[in-house]
Image (spheres, rainbow, N blue to C red):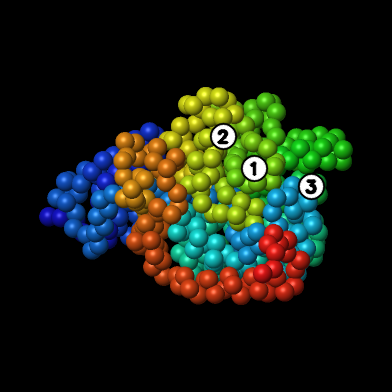
Amino acid sequence: MQQPVDLLIYPRWLVPVIPAGVVLENYALAVDRGRIVAVLPAREARERFVARETETLETHALMPGLVNLHCHAAMNLLRGIADDLPLMSWLSEHIWPAEAKHVSPRFVHDGTLIACAEMLRGGVTCFNDMYFFPEAAAAAVSTSGIRAALGLTVLEFSGAYAKDADDYFAKGMAAYEALRGKPRLSFCLAPHAPYSVSDRSFERVAALAHELRLPLHIHVHETRDEIAQSLKEHGVRPLERLRRLGLVGSKLIAVHAVHLEAQEIAQLAACGASVAHCPTSNLKHGSGIAPLVELLEAGVNVGLGTDGAASNSRFDLFEDMRLAALLAKGNTEKASAVDAHRALAMATIGGARALGLDDEIGSLEVGKAADLCAVDFGALRLSLCYDPASHLVYAASGDEVSHVWVEGKARVKNRAFVDLDAEALRASAAGWQGEICSVSRVRRQTLPG
């Protein structure tokens, strides 16, 4: 007697990520009640299961949904507002003034919802966010059906969300209590950066992280100026300051981590910390190139992040996979430095592991949530495929994602949203562009017609 299941997917190739380096051809994946219940040869699947829904994907590779380990989702409403600037000029002269004028619960909800749609369309099924008004972001996550780790942000200076560090802590904990237990939501403590958070606040963050067992999501060692400032003001490099304050441990997600010395890499490896590698953002701001190969060789868990669309301009994690692998090869002059399977692992199980979600997502294993994406190799430039993993990393882009499931529920099907209204999202984006341009000074590169 055949076992009933909700969904059977028959892709041409299946890339499970775990076991590492494996590609399965003519296999099937069975899903029931949002969980993967079997990965098995297609012939056996037809004999064993009867499905309420079947997807036959003859030119596709099926893989885990991508995990975007670092972003500021709502900032996509500021995409392109100021480009071609070093990080601190970009922040202090353009982004922070714009945020002071525009950030609100409505801004965060609308911006996050548009970002969720873009990420889903590109195969991202989970993102790690650092921004304001987490309740508004959570509402957008709920509407879109994506999975998210919401950052409980801490800063010292006042803004639209909070007036001081104490207010950030109070509002963050209120959001945590109100939202915890909601579907597809988890949380991180998210002190912004060493240059924007005091020792007192870092100590409070460390105590909360220990009490609540939450990951610590923080920008660190992003630029040389950040390190110089820390040496001047604190007498030590930022990572050492964080260590002394109790933040460097297995829960740490060190975002960017571009400028690391050998002993700092060894320290991150020894304590089981993770790094969110954001190669596109690092390059766009001229911040440098992170020592990815050294981190991986030391045993540091690495995931991939896009950063915000205001600093990357895209939420295409396929692009960041490719760039991460190519930069590692160029930096070391070794073509094998980061191969396709390692890049895929960083974009999936690496991010899941950093968030403490690797028992739930990040690979196609029985018992895990069915967070999946299918990539279509049917286009002419992809139709000759000798190695699907190579194609996923070096040839494909988010545009080739055709289907996305989160907890077994289709969110994108045949390149179209299942539940979201793309035209309504475009109208929302256009409305925000008009509102922002009417109030803020926007750097324009075009001449009037």
Q: Secondary structure at mark 2?
A: helix
Q: Residue at 42% of width from left, 35% of height from top?
A: 341
Q: Tell me if residue 287 comes above or below residue 133 in the rendering.
A: above
Farthest front residue in view? 449
Gap in Å between the C-alphas at discs 3 and 2? 28 Å
- Give the x, y percent position of residue 90: 74, 53
- Disc 1 marks a residue whose amino acid type is Leu
Number of the label disc, if any, that sits on residue 327: 2
Q: Residues within 10 Å of mark 3 (few under 14, many from 20)?
A: some
Q: Are marks 3 and 2 in contact (CB under 8 Å)?
A: no
Quarter of the picture holding the N terminus: bottom left
Q: Residue at 20% of width from left, 49% of height from top?
A: 45
- Give the x, y percent position of residue 38: 27, 48
Farthest right residue in view? 232
Horizontal arrangement in the rendering, residue 381 relative to residue 119 (left or right): left
Q: Quadrant of residue 155?
A: bottom right
Of the numbered discs 3 and 1, the one sitting upstream in the chain is 3
Residue assigned mark 3: 195
Front residue (pair 226, 301): 226
